[in-house]
Image: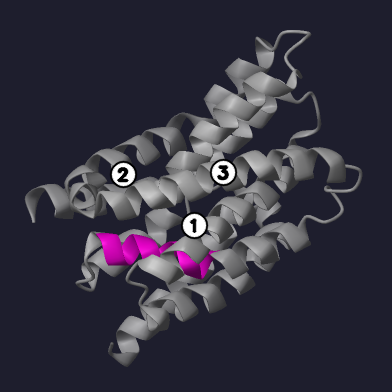
Amino acid sequence: MTPIEAVAILLAGLAAGTINTIVGSGSLITFPTLLAFGYAPLDANVSNTVGFVPGSISGSIGYRRELAGQRGRALRLSVVAAAGGATGALLLRAFPGAFAAIVPVLIGVALVLVAIGPRLSRALAEHRRPDAHRAWPLSVSLFGSAVYGGYFGAGQGIIMIALLTIFLPDDLQRLNGLKNVLAVVVNGVAAVIFILIAPVHWDVALLIAAGSVVGGQIGARVGRRLPPQLLRAAIICVGLVAEARLLFG
C-alpha cells in the first residue's frame, strides 16, 4: 500500500463513518475505493466490515441522548440483528465464489435504496397500521435486513431505518440512534466471524476504523445540518463509478 492509497482509504473511512451515522450506505464510499486500488471484492468487503465496527460504535455513542429509554427494545432487537448478521457472514464465507459475480447487483440494489430511501420511509410511515408495533413482523423483516448486512452491508442502514419507521411509532432521530446500535451488532458479529475464517487485510481495516471513528462523531454532531440530498447524490455518483468499473472494466 502506498502512502497516497493509505490517505485515500483513511479519508474514505472518515466520509463513510459520517454517512453511516446520518443515512447509512457508507460502504458505497469505501468499497469502490478498495476495488479501485486492486483489492478483490471478497477481501474488500470483509476488511470493510471489520473496519466499520469502531465507527458504528462511535456513531452510537454520538446518538446516546436519542437512545435514552430504548434499552429494552434495543436489547431485544439486537438478538435478532446478531442472528441475521451471523447468517449473512456465514453465507458469504460458504459461497465466496458467488460474491464477485453478484457484487454489481448488490451495488445496484444499494444505489436504489439510497435514491428512494427517504421517500420509502415517508410512504411507509403514512400507511403504518395502528397495530404495526407488534414484535414479530419487525423481528422477521429485521432478520432479513441483517442477513443482507452481514453478507454485503451497503444500504443496510437505509433498510433498517425504513423498517423501524414502519413498525415503531417514535421520533425519527430516536429511531436513527437505534439503527446505529443495530448496525454495531450486525457488523460486530459479522466481523468476528470474518476475523476467524475470512481474509482480513488489517492495514485496510485499521485505516477505515480510524477514519470512521472520527466520521461517526462528525455525523452525530454536525451531520444533521448537512443537506441530505447532497450526501445522497455523492453516494450515488461514487456507486455508479464502481458499478461501471465492475461491469465494463
Picture layout, residue 111 above or below residue 153: above
Q: Local crowd at mark 2 within 10 Å, few (<14), some, or many (≥20)?
A: many
The answer for how far apart the CA atoms under marks 2 and 3 are is 23 Å
Q: Sequence order check: which comes first, mark 2 or mark 3? A: 3
Residue at the image point whose x is 75% and y is 18% from the top: 134
The chosen color scheme is one colour
Residue at the image point whose x is 32% and y is 55% from the top: 93
Q: Amino acid at mark 1?
A: Ala
Return the residue at label 2. 107
Q: Amino acid at mark 3?
A: Ala
Q: Position of residue 67 (x, y in %)?
A: 83, 48
- Residue at the bottom extreme of this rendering: 3
Q: Position of residue 138 (x, y in %)?
A: 65, 25
Q: Are marks 1 and 2 in contact (CB under 8 Å)?
A: no
Return the residue at label 1. 190
Residue at the image point whose x is 8% and y is 56% from the top: 249
Q: Position of residue 114 (x, y in %)?
A: 45, 38
Residue 88: quarter of image: top left
Q: Sequence order check: which comes first, mark 1 or mark 3? A: 3
- Residue at the right extreme of this rendering: 69
Picture layout, residue 41 above or below residue 71: below
Q: Which range is magenta?
A: 42-52
Q: Please tell me whether mark 1 or mark 2 is closer to you in this view.
A: 1
Identify the element where label 2 is drawn: helix
Return the residue at label 3. 83
Q: Please tell me whether mark 2 or mark 3 is closer to you in this view.
A: 3
Q: Sequence order check: which comes first, mark 1 or mark 2? A: 2
Q: In this rendering, would 141 be left or right of 12?
A: right
Q: Position of residue 46 (x, y in %)?
A: 38, 63
